Amino acid sequence: SGRTSKRPGKEKEIMANESRAATYNDTPDLKVIFDDGQTVHVHSQILLLSSTVFRKMLSSEMQESLNKEIRLPGKSRAEFVALMEFLQPLSTMSLTAETARCLGMWSEEYEIDALKSKSEDYFINFAQMNRDILLFALTYNFSKLTKTCLDYMFENLGACIDQLDVITTDPYWMQLYWPKLCAAANVDMDCPEPQHLAAMWPMVASAVCLQEKAAEAAKVAEAEKAAEAAKAAEASKRASDGMILFRGRKEGGLQFGLSWLTALRIRLFKEVKLPSSSARVVRVRPVPH
């Protein structure tokens, strides 16, 4: 009878262990299906924790949640596999330009904020800011990348003005940077209505180009003026150095003449025999001068 009394407790323990095993089962529980019929089996919890869009799909009474499978029309299996690799806990995979672009698009569509920030940071730190990057940032709502790109292009406006036409499709950013465009074009006018931005852009770009060329011409003229001034100063210095050298040589010549006269005086002080019969020795005194 003692054995019988212990049996229910043992059964409960076994059931609890089985329940824990089911809870922590590492077998993928979600099937992802693509247009070409290919599939990938993944852990639904990773998608639930990473993406608000997948969370809504899998946490409701939607068909995806009930069938434990989801379809991703128009999506690439290879891209989804790359996405899952980056979403794995403690993932150490590094981004490239290709994966940052690909995963940036996925992160915007499926609202994966952590991955979106990582993709955006990659472009800010490693990409060359140009029209292509700006268009990507505007299309997928990378606000920090958009600002970084626009700041760079406005600092180099002469070289980048032809690439800024893409912001005519975004009234928010055009309104924000319109004062800088007006200052560069040397005009004072309000930002046009969104429907008129694209039509007015060629005129704005031309005005900016003209002002950039004028500013560049002014810089060249200023540089030439400075070069001429430096050249004149150098010529003046050379003339001054020449006068100093001439004076030195002149003074040196006078010194040489005085030295020669001094030597001549010394010789005149020496005793000289006169050609007379008395052979008298006389001392000739130098004539004062």
Image (cartoon, rainbow, N blue to C red):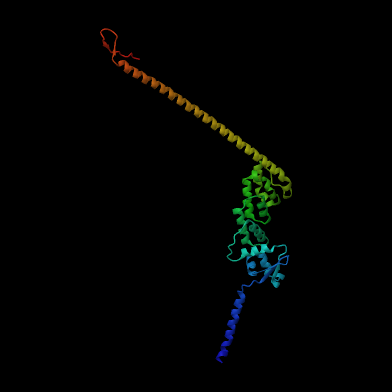
Image quadrant holding the C terminus, namely top left
Report whether 121 appears left or right of 206.
left
Taking depth in this image into account, of 68 and 188 the one nearest to the observer is 68
Can residue 62 be seen at all in this image of the molecule? Answer: no
Looking at the image, is 107 positioned above or below residue 227? below
User: Residue drawn at (65%, 39%), measured in percent from left and top?
Assistant: 213
Residue 276 screen position, x and y as percent: 28, 7
Q: Residue furthest top?
A: 277
Image quadrant holding the N terminus, namely bottom right
Residue 250 screen position, x and y as percent: 43, 22
Looking at the image, is 124 positioned above or below residue 203? below
* Corner quadrant of residue 228: top right
Looking at the image, is 233 positioned above or below residue 133? above
Residue 278 screen position, x and y as percent: 25, 8
User: Residue drawn at (65%, 48%), measured in percent from left and top?
Assistant: 177
Can residue 52 be seen at all in this image of the molecule? Answer: yes
